[in-house]
Amino acid sequence: MLGDPAVSVAWLARTVARFGVPLRKGHVVLPGSCTRAVDVTAGATFTAEFAGLGSVSLSFI
């Protein structure tokens, strides 16, 4: 068992608050993510490069 997820969210709120970033009602928490979410629009292409693994691209139509 990994424990109560509220404990993890509380830790996250305290941690990002030290950087002046408040965690507010309605914010989306992405467990396991190391990047922020970004908005996408039709025609957008995103590429991620991973050292030692290569790259992957995603295009939205």
Image: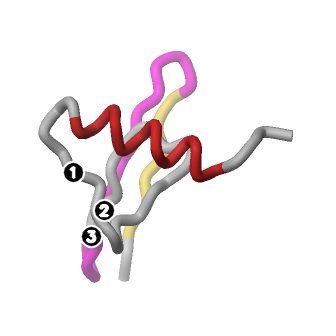
Residue 25 belongs to magenta span: no
Residue at 34% of width from left, 58% of height from top? 37
Residue at 55% of width from left, 49% of height from top? 31
The N terminus appears in which quarter of the rendering?
top right
Q: Residue furthest left?
A: 20
Label 3 secondary element = loop
Residue 31 drawn above or below residue 27: above
Of 22 and 55, which appears nearest the observer? 22
Numbered range of the magenta stretch: 40-53
Q: Quadrant of residue 7?
A: top right
Residue matched to label 3: 39
User: Which amino acid lies under the numbered mark 2 shown in the image of this protein?
Assistant: Thr
Colour scheme employed for the rendering of this structure? secondary structure
Label 2 secondary element = strand
Residue 51 belongs to magenta span: yes
Q: Nearer the viewer, mark 3 or mark 1?
A: 1
Q: CA distance from mark 2 to mark 3?
A: 12 Å
Give neighbour class at mark 3: few <14, some 14-19, many 20+ (Cα, 10 Å): few
Residue 34: x %, y % from top left: 43, 37
The answer to whether 24 appears left or right of 30 in the picture is left
Residue 35 drawn above or below residue 49: below
- Mark earlier in primary sequence (3, 1): 1
Residue matched to label 1: 22
Q: Are the residues flagged by discs 2 and 1 in contact, CB closer than 8 Å?
A: no
The answer to whether 16 appears left or right of 33 in the picture is left
Q: CA distance from mark 3 to mark 1?
A: 20 Å
Residue matched to label 2: 45
User: Which amino acid lies under the numbered mark 3 shown in the image of this protein?
Assistant: Asp
On residue 35, which mark appears?
none
